[in-house]
Structure formats: C-alpha cells, structure tokens
C-alpha cells in the first residue's frame, strides 16, 4: 500500500523527468492532495507559483495526477478526456514519462526513478 508521502514523492519524481526545468520545477501542491480509498489525486504547479503566488508563474492546463494506492502506478489525465497509465515502478532505460506521456526526448533519459 502506497502512503500519502510516497505518492507525493512519486509524482514529484515523475514531474522532474516528464518536464525537467531546473529553474522552475513542477511540484505537487501538497495541500491539494486528495486521499481516496484506492488512489491519491495530486494537484501540481510550478514551484515558483506555489512559493510566491505570482500569477506569472502559474501553469495552465495541468490536470491532476492520480496515484494508485495499491501499486503506485501513475495515471495522467489528458485534455481529451482519456488518460495514460504509467506502470510502477517507473522502468529504467527510456523512462515511462518519456515513452508514455511526454512523447518528446528528455534531457537525460538515463536518469530514472531507480533511487
């Protein structure tokens, strides 16, 4: 069973791989994490927006990320109404964030969630 803190860690690590931006990383907004019987629903935004609340740093179109409490898999909602499931743990090599969701190359795809 995945705990709330583990779900937050998984989503933060996923966001770092999916959209790497060292100057303003995407992070989970912890007060908005909702706990349900079989999942966690995690809202996220840019770190600068969460820290400053300045509208210029706020992201648009970022749908919640859902973490399965049983196996830690990540489900990313899409604007089309569908979703993509990222198996847990995220695989090595070409990571799931690249292969399943982003469909664009990462700066360093060898850095995977193996730590």
Image (tube, rainbow, N blue to C red):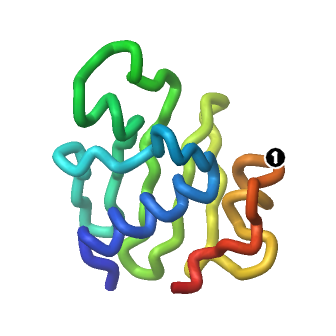
Q: In which quarter of the image is the N terminus?
A: bottom left
Q: Is residue 106 left or right of residue 82?
A: right
Q: Is residue 5 left or right of residue 76?
A: left
Q: Is residue 7 left or right of residue 89?
A: left
Residue 10: x and y in percent read 44, 68
Picture quadrant of residue 45 = top left
Residue at position x 47%, y 81% from top?
71
Q: In this view, does 71 lie to the left or right of 113?
A: left
Residue at position x 33%, y 14% from top?
55
Residue 19: x and y in percent read 62, 46
Residue farthest to the front?
23
Q: Is residue 88 above or below residue 60?
A: below
Residue at position x 39%, y 22% from top?
58
Residue 42: x and y in percent read 35, 50
Q: Name the residue under label 1.
A: 104
Residue 33: x and y in percent read 25, 51
Q: Identify which residue, 37 or 68, lies in the foreground.
A: 68
């Amino acid at each position: 069973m995945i705990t709330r803190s583990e779900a937050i860690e998984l989503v933060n690590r996923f966001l770092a791989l999916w959209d790497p931006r060292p100057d303003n990383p995407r992070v989970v907004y912890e007060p908005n994490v909702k706990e349900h019987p079989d999942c966690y629903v995690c809202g996220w935004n840019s770190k600068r927006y969460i820290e400053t609340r300045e509208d210029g740093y706020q992201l648009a179109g970022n749908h919640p990320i859902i973490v399965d409490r049983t196996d830690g898999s990540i489900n990313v909602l899409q604007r089309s109404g569908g979703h993509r499931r990222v198996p847990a743990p995220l695989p090595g090599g070409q990571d799931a964030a690249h292969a399943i969701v982003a469909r664009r190359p990462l700066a360093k795809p060898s850095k995977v969630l193996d730590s």
